[in-house]
Image (tube, rainbow, N blue to C red):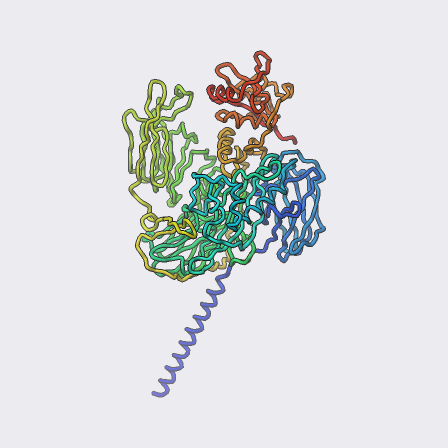
Amino acid sequence: MKKVLTKLGVLLLIFILGVIGFSSFMNKETTENKMDMEEASLPVLSMMYEGQEMNRMYGYAQEMQVDFMRDSLTPVGTDKKMTVSILPYDHKIKNLVYEVRTSDGSKVVENAKIKNFEENGSAQTATFALENSILMNQEYTLVFTLNTDKGSWHYYTRVIQRTGLNVDKYLEFVQSFSSKTFSKDNVGELRTYLESDDTAVNNSFTNVNIHSSADMVTWGSLAPAISRKGVPTIKDINETTGSLTLTYYITAKDEEGYEEYYQVDEFYRMRYGDTRVMLLDFNRSAKQIFTGNEMSVSSGKINLGVTPKNVQFAASQAGSVLAFVQQGDLWSYNTSTNKMTQIFSFREGRDTDDRYDYSMHDFKIVRVEENGDMDFVFYGYMNRGEHEGYTGTCVYHYYSEQNVLEEKFFLPTTKSYEFMKRDVEILSYVSTDDLLYLMLDNSLYQINMQDKTYKVVKEEIAENCFVASNTNRHVAWMEEMDPLQTMNIIFMDLETGEQKRITADEGTKIRAFGFINEDLVYGVARDGDIVVDATGSLRYAMHEVKIQKFSGKLVKDYQQDGVYIMDVDIQQGLLELKQAQWNVDRYTEIPSEHIMNNVKNAEDEVISIATATTVRQANITRLIFSEDSRNKNPLRMETKLMVNENDTVLNMDIKEKALDGYFVYAKGSLAGIYSSPAQAIRAADEMMGVVLNRNQQYVWERGNQKTKVTLNLDDIPEGFRSASLDTAALQESLGDTGTVLNLTGCTLEEVLYQVSAQRPVIVSLGENDNRVIVGYDGYNTLLYDPASGETKYMGLDDSTKAFEAAGNVFISYIETLPE
């Protein structure tokens, strides 16, 4: 018996040791399979102007398409000297190569290597001068390649040679104005620059502008302190105005004494007068960085703090798990376990440098499972980690039980974040069988993330001919690629890959407008109702609007006798049908009809967004649960990255296409791309921005025109002296020397920019009565009449009225850049 007990004891001991050993091995394997994200390592460059740092540049691991890189503009004087500053961050610099390219990147103007640097604190600086001539008032791209002992990286800015730019005055003003906002003692001085009025809503630190009260500009009752100063970035500058941005970080104490952290983005548009800088526009947005601390959840609410209301969020079907994006970070909250998890973030504490906070990236949450697992798309500039210095699209899966993040796929791009963001926002969807759908250069791609193969589902998708649901699961496109002449709509479920065709009845056309939830909204128009009416406008008058499920079931069929739908606007589940009736020879507008969506998304059922007003922080934003929860003091967690031995990178064998059109930049960023120069100019004027063409030439600038101009008739192209409105004939007369700009619909004030830039403008005064604007002053336009050969003045008010009466028909051109 004793021997039996001894054997049993030995076996039990072996079992226990085996369990301990196996557990230890598994824990070791699990630990070894997880890692923290690698720290930021790339050096940072800046330009210097008379000792002031500006235009900070972050490193790229691959050469980017230079026409997409427009983050900063560096002015160059007549001596063509520039100074660059390098923060090496433990790198040993070998040399710095610079290259000046034409703005579209097609031609290298100059390149050279810099080997000698001066120590300037923690930075190293070098001054160099361009040897070759560059055109005045024309942008070029300046590309730096920094070669170090740990690798080579590329940095981008633009350069422009202009005179009388007052750069030092603008840089000094921005730093001074920003610092003075932190003291109430400066309210009187700051008020002289502001245009405070009743139009400003003084209840949010996310939207403070030149019309806000001086109290809001000086931070109300927030009482912040600067945590990290910013470096100004010049966005646009000319002889008249300058536009700069400034990003910095502040801290403030809440009512319990906890420290809050904010990112602040400021935009300044200025003009320098005889003695001082005049502030033309000012915008400031402060956004609180969510920390998930013990104060973040209370009474069924996630308190996001000072942040815009347009929060991206998603929920599991039952609503037990919420995912949301805040200031470049992705979070999830499990209402059952009271766990707040930071799923993805580049940040590394608060005392690190700004490489960790550089916010040129975003997320698209694809799905959230009830167990907390999540699929999401991350896109933009990679601040740190395995792909540091790349810009691209990454697909991740989060495993909640292991609290680990797996990278499933990475697609690099040579476009800047601003441009690639437009594609990803149109469409990015991950199916449950690992198929990624992306819109790339106007083509719909299906990518198999497992074997990294891809195919084009639909190529050359025209503007306004593609729509997607909010989840991106369902898409539709007009097969004829003409929104006004479509007979077929292709309706596709990206989860299953199935396509269905919707075909118009004989004698009708159909047009897709968008989705309500996952249901397609499209209109039907009879051929005879698509007409050019008495106003000269092409009117697409629909007699019917339908809402249809993918299964083919009709959810709604709206039509009224004698009523036509001219357009459909879809916003947050509400359809606005803009209506008209036929009246003799034209369509006359009547009040719109509204159709409510009575079926809510799963997220809307369990979570909503609300704002609350506080004394100290003004408006704050909260995520509200559908069910009141008394949970508080959540357990805060951070994910680990899964060590992935598989190659997740796909380098697609496609060349990024050059974007055609007219690019509007306003308030420091890309505001829109337009096919029509007139549309672009009107948008830029409203936003106080600029318009550039494909070659990055200035087509239009707000406020940058001379007070008086007279063109020499002999310098005007012969076709334009004829004052013909035939744009094809005008283009033929210009040949390769220029491109015709049809500016019809612009105002006289807007088109005088072209005259200021030494370009004539053809204008209509009525049928068969055209003139050429060849000059202006503060009181008149100067008009050339080709019929009589005479040039006469017309008062500005009379000109404005006459041109408007004739439909504001204007035609000009822009010169082709010399080779």
Of residues 618 and 426, the one nearer the viewer is: 618
The C terminus sits in image quarter: top right
Of residues 585 and 397, the one nearer the viewer is: 585
Task: Tell me what residue is drawn at x 54 percent, y 48 percent.
Answer: 180
Of residues 644 and 251, the one nearer the viewer is: 251
- Can you give x and y, in whole percent of width and height, for residue 730 in the image? 56, 21
Q: Quadrant of residue 636?
A: bottom left
Residue that extends furthest to the top in the rendered view of this protein = 788
Of residues 65 and 78, the one nearer the viewer is: 78
Task: Tell me what residue is drawn at x 40 percent, y 76 percent.
Answer: 16
- Can you give x and y, in whole percent of width and height, for residue 381 in the image? 53, 48
Please, is residue 569 above or below residue 727 in the view?
below
Please, is residue 605 above or below residue 298 in the view?
above
Residue that extends furthest to the left in the rendered view of this protein = 561
- For the image, the number of numbered tags is 0
Please, is residue 306 above or below residue 210 in the view?
below
- Can you give x and y, in whole percent of width and height, for residue 723 in the image? 56, 17
Q: Quadrant of residue 510?
A: top left
- Can you give x and y, in whole percent of width and height, for residue 486 in the image? 39, 29
* Residue 744 showing in the rendered view: yes
Please, is residue 510 above or below residue 639 in the view?
above
Q: Is residue 756 left or right of residue 127?
A: left
* Residue 736 showing in the rendered view: no
Residue that extends furthest to the bottom in the rendered view of this protein = 2
Task: Tell me what residue is drawn at x 34 percent, y 55 percent.
Answer: 300
The N terminus sits in image quarter: bottom left
